Amino acid sequence: MAATPTQPVEPRRLGRTHRLRDLHDPQDLPEPPRRRSRPPVRQRKLTGRFTLAALLALAVITGSLAGLTLVYSVDLPQINDLERYRPSTTTDLYDQKGRIIGSFALERRVIVNYGDFAPILRQAVISIEDKNFESHWGINVFRVIGAVWHDLRNHGRMQGASTLTMQLARNLFLSSERTAARKVQEAYLAIQIERAFTKEQIFTLYGNQIYLGSGMYGFEAGSEFYFGKHAKDLTLTEAALLAGLPKGPSAYSPLFNPEKALRRRNLVLSEMESDGAITHMQAEQARETPLGLHIAQPEMSVAPWFQEEVRRELEKRFGSEQVHAAGLRVQTTLDLDLQQTANRAVADGVAAYERRHGWQGKLENVLAEGSTIEGYNHLDWAVKSGPGDYVHAVVSSALPLEIHARVGRSDVLLIQDDWKWTGQRYGDALVKRGDVIYVHLQNDMEGLSRRATLEEDTGAEGSLMAIDNTTGDVLAMVGGRDFALSQFNRATQAERQTGSSFKPYVYAAAVESGAKPTDIIVDAPVSFGSYTPHNYENDYKGAMSLTYAFAESRNIPALKLAARVGIHKVIDMAHRFGVTSTIPAYLPVAIGAVEITLEEQVASYAVFPNDGLRVKPRLIRKVENADGITLWEDSPQVDQVIDQQTARTMMTFLRAVTRMGTGKEAAQLNHPVGGKTGTTSDFTDAWFLGFSPSVTCGVWVGFDSRQSLGEKETGAKAALPIWMTFMKAAIAGKDDEQFLADQDDDKLKAAAAPQPPEPAAPSIPHLHASTPPAAPKVVSLKSQHAAGAAVP
């Protein structure tokens, strides 16, 4: 029964009320008082636990990140190192007049300043690579979050989020592997770089470091390679193309993937438009513009064999990495003008030899080999060619009066006069479509085609080397006919039979033993045991002076002298001159049955005009680092080989050769010169070695296969014309130079000449030393007598 309102309600405990609630009629129970709702205890406990877990997780993440940063930053370079950082740069070679002649590099890079990047290029790079470059502090948090979200959705495929600063850090200090660890290191370094450098400095470092494909590093090198201009002169489309390359230099290469490169460039233009860097009209016009490449075809080094010799010497001294990456400045001994003359002299001389032996007509045909004219590429075409060059060409059409051919991407034209020397009248009877011919490019143009003359390449080779007599400086070096086809250096590496050019060692040994130019020797049949030699002409001229025998290169007198002084003494003399070849001790060595390099022959012949002093040939004068500090300097190395009197006696022999002997054509130079021809059996090697008072030069002509050059192809015929062409340039402007012996004779004559009396002073007696009257006159008369006796 329910209690009346006036009746007091007995207070009940909460637990009791709960337990009795179901035992009473709900209507009999009083309405419980309303209370504010509170979360269940269990829910509050879960919330607390979750908060605690979140805090712990945050602490763990923070600690882990700190630990990772510490771990991954331990081996990282100090940011101060970047202030002293030098990117890999080109080592440049200079000739003796300071003109650049070549370079070495692992990475082709040209370092420039911030202002040397065109503003449109800077904007293009920022638009496509890092829109917030000017405002972020090394990393872009929003891009990182976006990249992480992308990676999660794509199951771990790495999405790039690197800023320019992060890319710079990676390119300078880290590997290219795409891992989380590298990203942490990259971000850490980027932050440090941003704290230490300005935005201009960071962009400059980036712009000089980034790889753009085809071996080009940095925007300046890339601009010069792809467009033939400086980075500061780039147009909008050119800048957009370069800005798109860092993403994938190979994938977006305009050379190998032009369509992808075009799409990438247009994407850069769209990004620039969306950033407001260019207008919609500018973007539309630029997107319709072709790539517009102007690829800078590499030029052949003016002295490729010389450059290789320099590289070997530098690597031996400094190591390969420093030579190719440290940006050294190498002052070489080369004379650029003389080198260019040497190149032309050898090429023209060997071509003249080929013409003397007529048209052979054994031509390769690309069509017969299953190739196409359009798809054919010759090794010659890898480097730029121009007027004066000898190159191979593929015939595109052969008509009776015209031959059209292709050299790389250029067309050449030959008319009847250009192949007249072959004896063939009509072009279509001479060659056919697809034939690979050898041509000499001319200056004249016929429409869009360059004129050329037909030449022949049967494999004949030539080499030349010239040195300064006083210092040993190598002034010019040609190691073959075409470096693109053969890098073998025939001036320094090829040991060839010397023929009669060995005879100076025989005569020098004889002079040391007392022989004189006026001594008489008999040129007559003789046998040395089972060895019965003969002269080149197969004749004998009887009694003659040693001077005449040497000038005419008679074999019998040379063999008799060698037998008289002893072949061992002759060999010892050759070794004293610097010949390093192993020389067998048998008599035919006296007439050239020994192999020596052209380099050693040239160095030996320079001893004679040097009064018996041998100066070791040198290639390098000085090496400086990128800061101009001298790292190494080479001084001339001089040795006394023979005494002055022996050297001057030998000069009598050697000058007779160019005055009246086998090298008499050299007299046309109207200059004091001397030298010696050399021709081997079966005409396999042709030599001429000679000198002026200041320069010694040697020339060799022959085949690598050691086949005969042909009948009567002597040193005087095949090698001497090349030597004369070079020496005309070498002696230019040196009309007054004299050999040392001639200088001394002039001084002695001047000293011996009677002097006009000097008027005596009125009050002070005039005292002077008397001039020795006898000795100078005797020496001078002896020199005159020897010269007069040289004529047989």
Image (cartoon, rainbow, N blue to C red):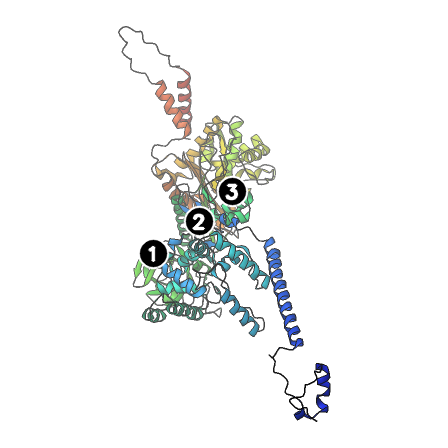
Is 733 on the left or on the right of 645, as rendered? left
Work out whether residue 746 or residue 220 is closer to the camera in this orientation and state it: 220
Q: Nearer the viewer, mark 2 or mark 3?
A: 2
Residue 345, image x and y in percent?
A: 40, 47
Give the amino acid type for the residue marked by disc 2 in the picture: Gly
Residue 575 seen: yes
Q: Residue at x 73, y 87 (%)?
A: 20
Q: Residue furthest toward the front?
A: 6
Q: Position of residue 745 (x, y in %)?
A: 39, 24
- State which tag comes first along the sequence, 1 or 3: 1
Which residue occupies the extreme top position in the image? 763
Q: Residue 466: give x, y in percent of width and height.
A: 44, 41
Q: CA distance from mark 2 to mark 3?
A: 32 Å
Type of amino acid at the residue the image marks with label 1: Gln
Residue at image coords 58%, 73%: 155
| Left or right: where 17 falls relative to 782 | right
Numbered disc total: 3
Disc number for residue 498: 3
Secondary structure under badge 3? loop
Q: Quadrant of the C terminus?
A: top left
Numbered disc 1: secondary structure: strand
Viewer-side residue, 223 vs 96: 223
Secondary structure category for the residue under label 2: strand
Q: Which residue is mark 2?
A: 102
Mark 1–mark 3 distance (CA, rounded to whole Å): 36 Å
Asked if labels 3 and 1 touch by Cβ distance under 8 angstroms, the answer is no
How far from the left and from the top, in percent, is residue 549?
46, 34
Residue on which the image places disc 1: 442
